[in-house]
Amino acid sequence: DRQLIAQKVLGLRTPATTLTPPEVKGFSATTFDELQKPMSERVAMAKALLKQAGYDASHPLRFELFYNKYDLHEKTAIALSSEWKKWLGAQVTLRTMEWKTYLDARRAGDFMLSRQSWDATYNDASSFLNTLKSDSEENVGHWKNAQYDALLNQATQITDATKRNALYQQAEVIINQQAPLIPIYYQPLIKLLKPYVG
């Protein structure tokens, strides 16, 4: 329940449905039908997929959620594990580390599911989406998708923002379908403006 985690557990966050935040210049987020469904329907879909994969109440899904020590990350990890247990019966073990050790373990691939966040280095969706390209050092899960890479490579050749955004939307659809990551929330965007600045 992204709404619960973003607003009730963490406060002042916006539930995320895409990797790219809606504030990014020229980006128009895709609306995914399954995320518009009531929680009960989404849970039923997830349980059906888990059953297909061989998981049930007598053989629950078990995994480890890995995060660095920080109050906000701990609250998020506890909320996520609680939600997964409540809705899906998943058994989640929480594992926390100090920042440097956490980074080393992530680079080494020593995790099942890891917390990650990203702040854009420039105001374009590619600043977020490029982190999942096959050759990106930020792609610590080593997810690879040739179609995804091709879309982003094609987008670098296009100057028309509308056409580039269409490619970014297709890339977000691939992320949603394959789930190499799970967007949970967007950080609040705080702007300070002087009254005389237009």
Image: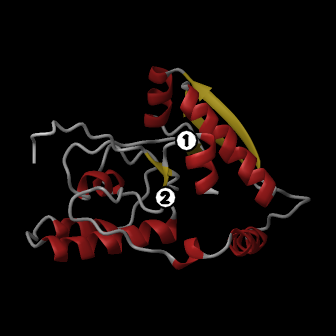
Helix, strand or loop for disc 2: loop
Say the numbered circle drawn on residue 180.
2
Residue 69 located left or right of residue 139: right
| Residue type (three-letter) at the residue carrying disc 2 | Pro
- The percent coordinates of residue 97 (x first, y second) are 57, 24
| Residue type (three-letter) at the residue carrying disc 1 | Gly
**What residue is shown at x 44% (from left), y 29% (from top)?**
103
Neighbour tally class for label 2: few under 14, some 14-19, many 20 plus, Cα within 10 Å: some
Among the 4 quarters of the image, the one containing residue 138: top left
**What residue is shown at x 35% (from left), y 58% (from top)?**
20
Q: CA distance from mark 1 to mark 2?
A: 26 Å
**What residue is shown at x 77% (from left), y 60% (from top)?**
88
- The percent coordinates of residue 174 (x first, y second) are 42, 71
Q: Is residue 146 visible?
A: no
Helix, strand or loop for disc 1: loop
Residue 41 located left or right of residue 122: right
On screen, residue 72 above or below 23: above
On screen, residue 31 above or below 116: below
Neighbour tally class for label 1: few under 14, some 14-19, many 20 plus, Cα within 10 Å: few
**What residue is shown at x 28% (from left), y 55% (from top)?**
130
On screen, residue 83 above or below 152: above
Among the 4 quarters of the image, the one containing residue 93: top right
Q: Is residue 39 visible?
A: yes
Count of labels in the image: 2
Say the numbered circle drawn on residue 125.
none
Residue at which label 1 appears: 11
Residue 175 located left or right of residue 115: left
- Quarter of the picture containing the N terminus is bottom right
**Residue extending furthest toward the front:** 195
**Residue extending furthest toward the right:** 58
Q: Nearer the viewer, residue 197 or 63?
A: 197
- The percent coordinates of residue 189 (x first, y second) are 34, 44
